[in-house]
Amino acid sequence: MLSVLFMTAGSCAFFRVHLCAGGPCSLCPTGKSNSSTMADDKDVLRDVWFGRIPTCFTLNPDEVTEREAEAYYLLLPRVSYLPVVTDKVKKHFLKVMRAEDVEEMWFEYEGTPLKWHYPIGVLFDFHASNTVLPWTITVHFKNFPDEDLLHCSSNSVVEAHFMSSIKEADALKHKSQVINDMQKKDHKQLWMGLQNDKFDQFWAMNRKLMEYPTEDGGFRYIPFRIYQTLSDRPFIQKLFRPVSPEGHAHTLGDLLKEMYPDALTNDGEQKRYQVLIHGIEPLLETPLQWLSEHLSHPDNFLHICVVPVPTD
């Protein structure tokens, strides 16, 4: 058994995974039930949840201010969304602006508007995984880019998007049976856990969405999205089962081979792409079911970023 220590890109948190020949050790034959596996790997879930990205927010120079606006620094949680965690940023810059000059706040990185409905960690991995920290984000209060971004008037809009994603993921995993069996207060607990950064509150309910009958060997389908920098389409999302018809566990490599073969490096070729999940490059041999249970975002999707290897 090999204990591998990762540091997630743009994160202060270290991430330790125990690996063996078949991928993470919790997936090697142990005779344990699914619930035991989840308990054993709770440290992984916790490390993923508490991943942070040091970020420097600066006001766009074109904004009209009454005095110079100082930069604002914040540790952004990878698993959350920009509108949920940037209220302090807004208050900071409003101190130097007149009310008539303030419209809807939006964010940009090196000329690219940042989609608030993508998790923060996905935005960083996709746009800035090879940048020097802190991640520098530009804040705007004018000229909202309607063609690039969805409007977000309040956190209730984020909540609606988040719950819609969870319901979509459970439709893939359990034919919506689990999420439909939950009460409205259970749905609210999922959202409040994310909004208030309460790991135990969130996972007390989310664990139900990660369960499956042992005899099935995994979910019905794996909820995933693959983001590519060299494509006009926002992401790849298709049906893919965690287990082959012959009963073999599908791996991350199997998924990429079918969905995005260019991300893989052939023998003798120089590596062209990094495959990032929460800022780390998991082994391609890692079983997809394990990744879905442990490295999915709170929306229950496995967000995979394929970015070019840095040339410098």
Image (cartoon, rainbow, N blue to C red):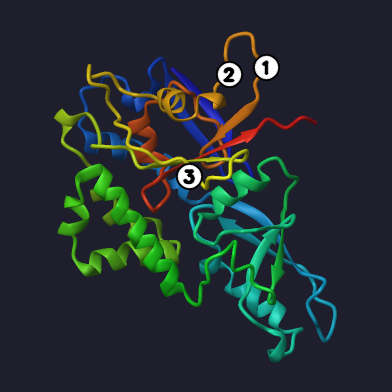
What's the residue type where badge 3 is placed?
Asp
Q: Are marks 3 and 1 in contact (CB under 8 Å)?
A: no
Q: Amino acid at mark 1?
A: Gln
x, y percent for residue 4: 52, 26
Upstream in sequence: badge 1 or badge 2? 2
Query: For the residue labelled by badge 2, is the local secondary structure a helix, a strand or a loop?
Result: loop
- Mark 3 neighbour class, 10 Å CA radius: few under 14, some 14 to 19, many 20 or more: some
Real-space CA distance between mark 2 and mark 3, rounded to the nearest whole angstrom = 29 Å
Secondary element type, mark 1: loop
How far apart marks 1 and 2 lie (CA) works out to 7 Å
- Residue type for callout 2: Thr
Q: Which mark is residue 47?
A: 3
User: Whole-percent x and y of residue 248?
Assistant: 27, 18
Q: Is residue 223 left or right of residue 54?
A: left
- Is 249 drawn above or below residue 198 in the view shown? above
Residue nearer the viewer, 25 or 208: 208
Asked if the residue under mark 2 is in contact with the one under mark 1, i.e. CB atoms within 8 Å, the reply is: yes
For the C terminus, the image quarter is: top right
What label does residue 265 carry, if any? 2
